[in-house]
Image (cartoon, helix red, strand yellow):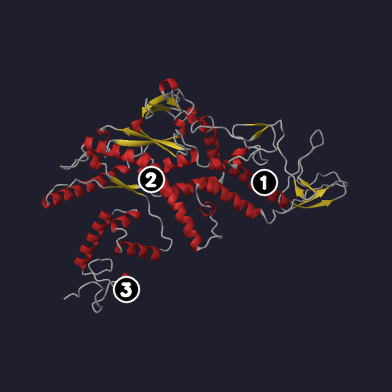
């Protein structure tokens, strides 16, 4: 308050009480500021902001089914929702996250001869694992529709669209004729009833736990609840499946979270409203183009062009087509609204809405919309580097750890038990589990610069050739074997290529001719 140009202090009423924190209670006047603006609740902006203290599982307990239905509805009908899911699956899985066995016999305490023999046996075992894995990948799907990497894509799509997926490992009989007696079945999250709770038996949201909180089983429907009408009478019976046979693929947003939420959940309202807005604009444009002109004429016995015969009440429908010149009876007049054009803010509004959707889904606006008009080379690289870092985290934390790792361990166990693989002497079963999972390589942004930077890292000792080959999605041992085969074939035909590392390197990696001086650091040949 001001009086005569001077500030006047307003004190709290004498009747106002003071709580333990020292804040005045019972009056807005003199109330102390909250330590955080959002936590105050007294200001005009936050007065209506009231939230509940939901736990990590309570928040989803009664909303997960609804979120799934709406997420799948948008994925079916909304092109931007479909595009967001497609782009995420493409970048997380691509052609597949592939294993590279790193099994090896420990050579600690061995002599040089023993070490050489152990390394050879390890290499032969890894080659046998690789051959057997490629034989099995085409047989991995229990229904025979996809290979192992196709199942990865389906499971990831189910996680993004519905919040979670289950991969059930199903051992088979040796008589089934599989390379390894194991197949996989991908199930949507609906197979596990989120409403099944039994505190007495430690069952929470369809998952059974033991006394120390570890998962021991999942209650699963035999058929998808949404397809119950297509199944038999026992389709909705629930079966307890041991947790060791289930891979639960989901993204936990909070510690202790049991089930996963659809990735589009924060953007569902925007997706729905934006789709309705775009449809309304299309309809408005269509209707605006329908009406061209009207011609009034003297009344006669004929009906207006395009009109049906009048019914008993004298009403008749009138159909319009683009370019119509409609004839009206005398004294008849029609007034139509004149909708304004979409205006200059349409593109900016749609772009900003799509940015919000892309941010909520975890992808880039440019990938979602296909609009790269506002990016230059430098900003594109920065955006892709950040997005790729997030994708690599999802690949490792979710796909590899929750699905690939348990499948690989079960696959090795059954391969050894069935006799498809034999451990070499000195190798433990734990050693056979060693594996490196390699996603599909990222495409080059600047091919020449990117390859040259890899060469510089290797030569400077900042990385190894095997590591760079793995980053490209390949196996260095397989590439070495192919290079040896190529070089042997070239030698037999009397050919020389720049790719042959035994040759002197000329400029830009081109094989040097006989008259070129030797490369720096190499001795001249005789």
* Location of the C terminus (image quadrant): bottom left
Closer to the camera, 392 or 187? Answer: 392
Which badge, 3 or 1, is on the more N-terminal residue? 1
Residue 347 pos. (x, y %): 63, 55
- Looking at the image, which residue is at 39% across and 66% down? 448
Disc number placed over residue 507 in the picture, else none: 3
Residue 487 pos. (x, y %): 22, 64
* Location of the N terminus (image quadrant): top right
Q: CA distance from mark 1 to mark 2?
A: 42 Å
In the rendered view, tell whether residue 327 sits above or below residue 232.
below
Disc number placed over residue 396 in the picture, else none: 2
Residue 33 pos. (x, y %): 63, 41
The label nearer to you, 1 versus 2, is 2
- Numbered disc 1: secondary structure: helix
The label nearer to you, 2 versus 3, is 2
Q: Is residue 453 left or right of residue 67?
A: left
Q: Which residue is mark 1?
A: 280
- Looking at the image, which residue is at 68% across and 57% down? 344
């Amino acid at each position: 308050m001001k009086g005569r140009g001077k500030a006047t202090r307003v004190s709290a009423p004498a009747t106002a009480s003071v709580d333990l924190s020292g804040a005045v209670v019972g009056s807005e006047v003199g109330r102390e500021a909250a330590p955080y603006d959002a936590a105050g609740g007294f200001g005009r902006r936050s007065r209506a902001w009231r939230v509940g203290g939901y736990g990590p599982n309570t928040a989803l307990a009664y909303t997960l089914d609804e979120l799934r239905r709406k997420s799948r509805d948008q994925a079916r009908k909304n092109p931007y929702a479909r595009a967001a899911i497609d782009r995420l699956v493409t970048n997380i899985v691509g052609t597949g996250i592939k294993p590279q066995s790193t099994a090896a016999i420990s050579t600690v305490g061995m002599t040089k001869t023993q070490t050489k023999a152990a390394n050879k046996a390890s290499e032969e075992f890894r080659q046998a694992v690789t051959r057997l894995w490629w034989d099995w990948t085409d047989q991995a799907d229990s229904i025979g529709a996809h290979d192992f990497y196709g199942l990865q894509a389906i499971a990831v799509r189910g996680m993004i669209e519905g919040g979670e997926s289950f991969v059930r490992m199903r051992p088979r009989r040796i008589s089934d004729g599989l390379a390894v007696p194991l197949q996989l079945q991908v199930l949507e999250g609906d197979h596990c009833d989120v409403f099944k709770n039994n505190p007495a038996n430690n069952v929470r949201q369809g998952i059974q736990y033991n006394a120390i909180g570890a998962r021991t089983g999942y209650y699963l429907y035999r058929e998808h609840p949404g397809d119950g009408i297509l199944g038999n009478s026992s389709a909705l019976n629930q079966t307890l499946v041991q947790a060791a046979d289930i891979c639960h693929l989901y993204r936990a947003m909070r510690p202790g979270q049991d089930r996963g939420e659809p990735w589009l959940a924060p953007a569902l309202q925007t997706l729905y409203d934006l789709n309705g807005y775009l449809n309304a604009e299309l309809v408005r444009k269509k209707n605006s183009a329908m009406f061209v002109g009207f011609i009034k004429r003297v009344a006669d016995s004929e009906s207006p062009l395009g009109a049906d015969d009048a019914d008993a009440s004298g009403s008749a429908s009138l159909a319009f087509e683009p370019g119509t010149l409609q004839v009206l009876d005398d004294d008849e007049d029609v007034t139509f609204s004149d909708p304004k054009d979409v205006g200059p803010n349409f593109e900016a509004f749609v772009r900003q809405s799509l940015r919000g959707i892309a941010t909520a889904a975890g992808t880039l606006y440019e990938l979602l919309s296909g609009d790269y008009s506002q990016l230059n080379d430098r900003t594109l690289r920065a955006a892709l580097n950040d997005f790729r870092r997030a994708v690599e985290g999802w690949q490792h934390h979710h796909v590899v750890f929750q699905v690939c790792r348990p499948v690989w361990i079960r696959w090795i166990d059954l391969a050894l038990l069935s006799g498809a693989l034999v451990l070499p002497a000195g190798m433990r079963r734990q050693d056979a589990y060693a594996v490196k999972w390699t996603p599909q390589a990222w495409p080059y942004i600047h091919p020449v610069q990117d390859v040259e930077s890899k060469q510089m890292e290797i030569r400077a000792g900042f990385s190894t050739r095997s590591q760079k080959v793995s980053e490209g999605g390949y196996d260095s041992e397989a590439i070495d074997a192919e290079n040896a085969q190529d070089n042997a074939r070239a030698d037999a035909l009397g050919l020389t290529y720049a790719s042959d590392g035994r040759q002197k390197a000329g400029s830009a990696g081109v094989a040097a001719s006989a008259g070129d001086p030797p490369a720096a650091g190499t001795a001249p040949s005789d």
